[in-house]
Amino acid sequence: MNGLRAALGVAIATVLISAWAQDGMPAGASAGAALNASGGSTAKTARQANRALKRKVYAALAKHKEIDAGNIGITAKSGAVTISGTVSDASQISTVIEVVKGVPGVTSVTSKLTVQRPFGQ
């Protein structure tokens, strides 16, 4: 009787493994490998979304001719935008922050902007 149970258990395991392999997962592949494969695509998607948001922020700043955005750097991560660099006038800092806050997809803004001082002062 025990031999029959063991044979039945082996047969069921074989059927389950082959059915799992037919679903696109190779036989012997672990669940961890499946998670890593799907996690890679979500990380890539997140990077693409961050780059797209960064481009939108730069485009919004370019529309405002009063802002000298040549020395401004943008970092975007999941809607959180950090702006860094220098501007020529202190009033531009608040303008830049307001423009960035108005970009669709921006959830928060961190400013690390400073005023560029002329050489020799």
Image: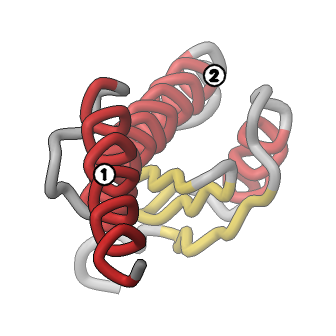
Q: Which residue is mark 1?
A: 11
Q: Report the quarter where the C terminus lies.
A: bottom left
Crowding near pointer 1: few (<14 within 10 Å), some, many (20+)?
Answer: few
> Do the residues bearing badges 1 and 2 touch, measured as CB atoms within 8 Å?
no
Assess disc 2: are there few (<14), some (14-19) or many (≥20) residues with their C-alpha within 10 Å of its C-alpha: some
The kind of residue tagged 1 is: Ala
Question: How far apart in space, not on screen, are marks 1 and 2 (Cα)?
Answer: 63 Å
Residue 41 horizontal side relative to residue 104, left or right = left
Identify the disc placed on residue 37. Answer: none
Left or right placement of residue 111 versus residue 7 in this view = right
- Residue 1: quarter of image: bottom left
Q: Which residue occupies the extreme top position in the image?
A: 63
Q: Residue at x 41, y 64 (%)?
A: 85
Tell me where residue 31 appears, x and y as whole percent.
36, 62
- x, y (%) of residue 71? 35, 50
Mark 2 residue type: Ala
- Provide residue 111's location: percent of width, then percent of height: 64, 69
How many marks overall?
A: 2
Under circle 1, the secondary element is helix
Observer-nearest of 46 and 15: 15
Q: Residue at x 19, y 55 (%)?
A: 29
Residue 66 visible, this orientation: yes
Name the residue nearer the viewer: 46 or 41: 41
Say what secondary structure mark 2 lies in.
helix
Q: Residue at x 75, y 56 (%)?
A: 91
Q: What label does residue 60 carry, if any?
A: 2
Residue at the (48%, 36%) spot, across then down = 54
In the image, residue 10 above or below residue 25? below
Does the image show residue 70?
Answer: no
Residue extending furthest toward the front = 1
Tag 2 or tag 1, which sits nearer the N-term?
A: 1
